[in-house]
Image: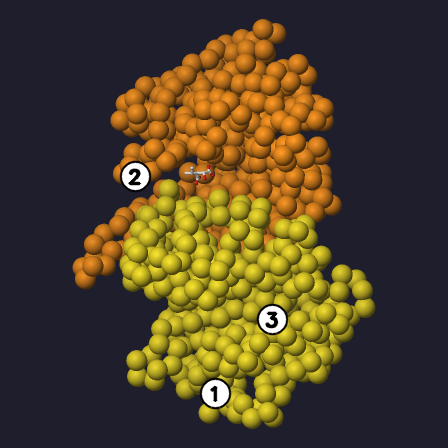
Chain colours: A orange, B yellow
Amino acid sequence: MPSLLLLPGDGIGPEIMAATKRVIEYFNAKGAGFELTEGLVGGAGYDADGTPLPPATLEKAEAADAMLFGAVGGPKWDNLAYDLRPEAGLLGLRKHFELFANLRPAISYPALADSSSLKREVVEGLDIIIVRELTGGVYFGEPKTIEDIGNGQKRAIDTQIYDTYEIERIARAAFDLARARRRKVTSMEKRNVMKSGLLWREVVEATHKQGYEDVELQHMLADAGAMQLVRDPKQFDVVVTDNLFGDMLSDIAAQLTGSLGMLPSASLGAVDEKTGRRRALYEPVHGSAPDIAGQGIANPIAMIASFGMALKYSFGMLDEANALDDAIAGALADGLRTADIAAGAPSIDTEGMTDAIIAQL
Amino acid sequence: MPSLLLLPGDGIGPEIMAATKRVIEYFNAKGAGFELTEGLVGGAGYDADGTPLPPATLEKAEAADAMLFGAVGGPKWDNLAYDLRPEAGLLGLRKHFELFANLRPAISYPALADSSSLKREVVEGLDIIIVRELTGGVYFGEPKTIEDIGNGQKRAIDTQIYDTYEIERIARAAFDLARARRRKVTSMEKRNVMKSGLLWREVVEATHKQGYEDVELQHMLADAGAMQLVRDPKQFDVVVTDNLFGDMLSDIAAQLTGSLGMLPSASLGAVDEKTGRRRALYEPVHGSAPDIAGQGIANPIAMIASFGMALKYSFGMLDEANALDDAIAGALADGLRTADIAAGAPSIDTEGMTDAIIAQL
Ligand SMILES: CC(C)[C@H](C(=O)O)[C@@H](O)C(=O)O
Ligand SMILES: CC(C)[C@H](C(=O)O)[C@@H](O)C(=O)O
């Protein structure tokens, strides 16, 4: 039986997870047979167990085929020590399961192209994907410290480290993905100021020569890449980049579409040689939105679409994944909007949107 | 006598510098008395002297009140060793003179608001400034290495380091600047994943309390900040951020305006206690554009406007600076366009645009 660990987290996390659970149960009623367990993470984990990643959650994650992750964080936990912050729960999961390949599609929903700050013709039909390295770079490198250095001065140090194998495996993920798309990969780094950028480019280039020459490869400096993303995003297909650049570039790409509340992501690990399973976590690109939490008005689409990515990448259920994508597009085409995408027009709540999507299935 | 060192550099650098020299000579004819010297930097320095920052250039820079810098780099020098690359000349100047405060205005010229990829109403009237820390962070921290670690693997390391005083002085620069503007500073970092982000926020906050409370201070995570910059750039006034985030955020901000070829920048150091002068380098935000170099069609406005920033920040010649800004706006309002901003309509060349600006003065 396929199994899923649900990790609602904080803020609107529990609300959008409840909505997604209804969608999963719909598929179960049709015989999909998903086994669901739930776990605590983020601020919810800290409040219950004093840590954003309780051992019980890790155990459940070990046992499940994939994780659905809501969102973490909020003002309540803003002053916690660095390792106790809600985000540390998410970073811990990424690192523990070596979920190195973060896929962040930026798709412009036709019904929403006008809600972007970009001109309609610049974003209409946009369908690109950012492949972000997720377990290396400045996020995890040591030393990572703040020390007193005397005279009232402190010194903060963060370390960006990349080894050849880390770059090679994310490059392969990008090339493989491009093959099922428009066969174009753009690699972004700052080789003009970072040694990790130099190695990044060298390894991506070498990996390309190892059997990926049917895919077009282009290199861009990350600052120029950010510019080009804003100037003409449709020039891209797959963008591959490091953890920190990927954090910013994928947020920019999401914003371009005007569909932030709609965008899912997948974080994939290597195939486990013993179980044959690929470790995976699926989560919305948006955050925990504490300002609207508890009101039942959050847009559940990004979370539901993240389950759609799980159907595709963890369970090979392509028909179901497509049906779900169509159902979401159908509800939007019918004019249904949660408040975040209603641009002031009448809107429906989380439950209403979920009903509409299920009705479309 | 006020003195300026001209560093044309590579690509279109010499062309736009020649144009700017004509503007300076116009001011000299009116009695401004600028003494001009020239120096080699970047690929031009490497070709002549085997180094992107020849000692003779540094000597001239020591003697001058300010530097005007064109642009460096091009395919010709792409395979040089790390420290010999054209960019190393620019980085060397920034570091040698501790030009820690990089001011990058992003202004939407009314005549060009339609050339942005963003909707007119989102960028019309945009006037924000990115204050980027320029001599610290991952650009200069050690270790910065690539080593063989066996098994065919290499490891690349870059180090981001920030000390209290570095953050404090750039925060002060931002607050001081905001006072002459709309009194709002937004500080961007990633304190949720970087220790330098944590210290950044702490020091900016503490500096704010030391007599800057008349300026509104807001903090944003850099990824959310990049999003907000694309979603609604007019919400900002002054954005202060570190070297690497500033590199990307200022390029995005420049792109928003649709006026990339028009944007100048200033890189300012501390006031030298002996000479009372503030070290300064002024350069366009755009690069060396090797693809159009040698054709005489480059847009000289960003370089000329960089001289305008020198008038303002190095020489206190505010009337002249304003007159120059007005002359540029006037030439644009008359419909004159270089090819980069002509959107396919008839265009004039570098010299034609320079004539038009001088005629407006
Ligand atoms: C919450 C935070 C730690 C995280 C990151 O920086 O990776 C988030 O911004 C993301 O992009 O998933
Ligand atoms: C040329 C390069 C080293 C430089 C930088 O990264 O700082 C450039 O992108 C800039 O923004 O001035």
- Disc 3 under 8 Å from ligand 2? The reply is no
The residue at which mark 2 appears reads as: A79
> Residues under labels 3 and 2: Cα distance?
44 Å
Q: Is residue B29 visible?
A: yes
Which residue is at the front of the view, B103 or A338?
Answer: A338
Residue depicted at 61% across the width and 43% down the height: A256
Q: Residue, x 48% and y 11% (percent of image)?
A: A35
Q: CA distance from mark 1 to mark 3?
A: 20 Å
Residue for badge 1: B3
Q: Read off the chain for label 1.
A: B
Taking the spot 56% from the left edge, 69% from the top edge, the residue there is B264
Side (left or right) of A79 relative to B316: left
Q: Quadrant of residue B286?
A: bottom right
Q: Which residue is mark 3?
A: B302
The answer to whether residue B351 is seen in the rendering is no
Amino acid at dot 3: Ala
| Secondary element at image label 2 | loop
Which structural element holds mark 1?
Answer: strand
* Residue B65 circle label: none
- Mark positioned earlier in the residue sequence (1 or 3): 1
* Ligand 1 shown in quarter: top left
